[in-house]
Image: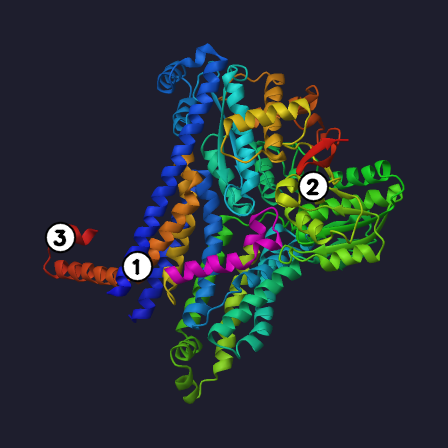
Amino acid sequence: MRKTTKNNLITFGGTLILCVVLGILMQAGKLNSMTTGLMVTIGIYIIASTSLNLTVGVLGELSLGHAGFMCIGAFSSATVSTLMINGGAPNWLSFAVAIIFGAIMAAILGFLIGIPVMRLRGDYLAIVTLGFGEILKSLFNNIYITSDKNGLHFGFTNPPKNIDASTKLEILRGPKGTSAPDLTNFWVVAAVLLICLIILMTFIDSKSGRACMAVRDNYIAAQSVGINVTKFRLMAFTLSAAIAGAAGALYMHSLANMLPKKFDYNLSILILVYVVLGGLGSLRGSIIATIVLYAIPELLRGINQNIVNYRMLIYAIILICLMLWKNAPVFINMREKIKAKCKKSKTADLTSGGAEA
Amino acid sequence: MKNYLKRTVAAAAAAVMTLGLVGCGENTSSTSNGTSYGNIGGDSAASNASGAASNTDSAASTADSTAADSGAASDTNGGTNSTPAGNGGTLVIGGIGPITGGAAIYGENVKKGAQLAIDEINAAGGVNGMTLELNFQDDEHDPEKSVTAYNALKDKGMKLLIGTVTSGPCEAVSKEATKDNMFLFTPSGSSVNAITSGDNCFRMCFNDPQQGKLEADFIAEKLDGKKKVGAIYDSSDSYSTGILDGFKEEAAAKGLEVVAEEAFTSDSNKDFSVQIQKMIDNGAEVLFLPIYYTETALILQQAEGKLDVPVVGGDGLDGLIDALGDKVDLADGVYALTPYSATAKDEKAVKFTEAFTAKYPDADAPIQFAADAYDCVYALKAALEKAEINDANIDASELCDKLKTAMVDMDEYDGVTGKSKWTADGEVTKDPKVMQIKVTDGKGAFTDI
């Protein structure tokens, strides 16, 4: 079996098993409410971080506006699902359509933004994506959509006027946030996550994906062998945006009220932290890093009130230590020594206590 | 090699910092525990037993009750409320609010206010034989974290919730709480939707449009002849836009004219010269500021000498005096509709402020969030007594059903923030309190008008 296929199978199989085991435990009522709640949120963040890994890891471009794509996915999907449910469509159908619509809207926007952005590289690209992310957030902070029997009413910076009060349905409420129907559950998140993983793995392993990696590794060489650089970069960027849109849609429907403020620079950076600490270009790394890093500050809640007060501080320290562990030469040497020892003890058929650590 | 050295030094420095901070933190918390033990000891002789001894007592006397686990958990929580008050067990009250991040001051105040009330109640013998215990969780002013905190509290045996402190998270948590039929009582979540998810949700403060309406009434009735109102508001903020909506509606009904309505956003809240100029151009006779005190302080400074009209604001202005520092003269004459201020002179407020500063000598003066939380706990006590609940092991949903009716049926609750009465939709009715800042000898104070 090819090494990539094997790797992908391990990642996918691992995720699948994890989802099934957690799902069964949840159905059996063996998990406490915090874990049950966390599973949904972490799943959504995994979708977001794996999609960002496509831009940052595979394409090699730093994107600081990923929350912007989640934002458009979130609010467009909320509009669709609210309208459909209000129109009498069943919940599951509305939600499925909403997720797909959110992903498509994010893809369209990703494509449009990608046209100017993909002419840039490196720091300039990062700054432009940062700008677009903020623009999208501010946009949704000002859009009002209300529906009544006469159809949809739009407002910008102010709620629309002359609404028929009896059939009034507020969908987007500008800075007051948007209340989407509460539809996200663990099984939906797990399904979307697995589908996204398949799409990402197939893309990365395809001709286009390898073209992207060629562009990442050597732009000029890739151009010189006839790769249409802009096309492949745009393709990866759009796909990344689409999946982020789907994550946004799930996110929107998991909480009762979502403010546009949530999709700010900090969210983009949070997701980027997961990607960078998990390892650029490694989907498995992103998944593990997201689970670990999201769970740490929440698990610290459980211990006692004194630790609760300092949990964000402890979280920061853990981040610093992880970063050092991952990148400092001395730790890399140490890890390699352990690995070598591990191999040696395996070949010599000996069990060594040090290797376990 | 040099690089490695740098990294190691950085890591070591970080570790030292953490140790230092945690060490300091534990010191302060142990002193505050000490203080409160002193208070309790002074109040009732029965609770003079040392913390450790009383813990064993309570464990023995409630050996048959499952509350023993939560009692054990409470010991690590600082141990302030481990005095056994009766045999009703320990009722775990959850609290959620931001104690880190930009809104941390609100969460901190609610936590301290609620803890103060709970310690006072426990020292006086608890509620119907039950001891109260507060478990307060951080939500970083983020709906997502807030829901996680809510779930964590449920796992820890929370029976009812005081919170959440801020509106956005409250909307998310109240929906979950309605699903579980968990009693939710927010001290300060003021957006309309914060408690609309079900009849299990109540609030201590006015909602935003209600506050805007009361402010419009105030301008129309008390500021004679001033009909032209100019408003500066934060268009990216739910609180600010909510108040303005209610204000505009009532202003139209009362014959006020909103001549200028200028927005800023949280990303550009430093320079207000354009907005102030608009107020002047449109001839505003009253400046209405449905915003927080930090921006208000800047607006007052930038409008100095240009715009000399009465200023009216909401409960966000509590804190304005400190924010202005030595320019406090600018705040002279500002009207604010706020239920409580640490500088207010009415009897209940003074008593609360004294108790608060005695318990937290290192903390800043309490803001209205602390007073709201304090009132929340006492109102809950009244509701628990009305519903005649005396067993802390009661099912949370059953407790919620009983409290729902008790909250509506009980007598008017007279607290720090005024006389409150609740309706079945969870909204509070109380007299609006408009205070005016008076500055004498460079010292500002909120005074009743």
Q: Position of residue A136 (x, y in %)?
A: 62, 63
Amino acid type at circle 3 is: Thr
Query: Mark 1, chain letter?
Result: B
B55 horizontally vs B301: left or right: left
Closer-to-camera residue (B393/B426): B426
Residue visible at 76% across and 55% down in the picture: B276
Assign the N terminus of chain A to one quadrant of the image: bottom left
Same subunit, tags 2 and 1: yes
Q: Is residue B335 visible?
A: yes
Q: CA distance from mark 3 to mark 1?
A: 33 Å
* Residue A263 belongs to magenta span: yes
Query: Mark 3, chain letter?
Result: A
Q: Mark 3 or mark 2: which is in front?
A: 2
Q: Position of residue A183 (x, y in %)?
A: 58, 49
* Residue B220 belongs to magenta span: no
* Region rendered in magenta: A251-277
State which quadrant residue B437 falls in.
Answer: top right
Secondary structure under badge 1? helix
Closer-to-camera residue (A305/B332): B332
Mark number displayed over residue A351: 3
Q: Position of residue A315 (x, y in %)?
A: 40, 48
Q: Mark 2 or mark 1: which is in front?
A: 1
Mark number displayed over residue B192: 2
B9 vs B445: above or below: below
Labelled pair 2, 1 in contact (Cβ < 8 Å):
no
Q: Is residue B160 visible?
A: no
Q: Dot 3: within a 10 Å radius of its alpha carbon, few (fewer than 14), some, or many (20 or more) residues?
A: few
Amino acid type at circle 1 is: Arg
Residue visible at 61% across and 48% down in the picture: A257
* Residue position marked by numbered label 1 in the rendering: B7
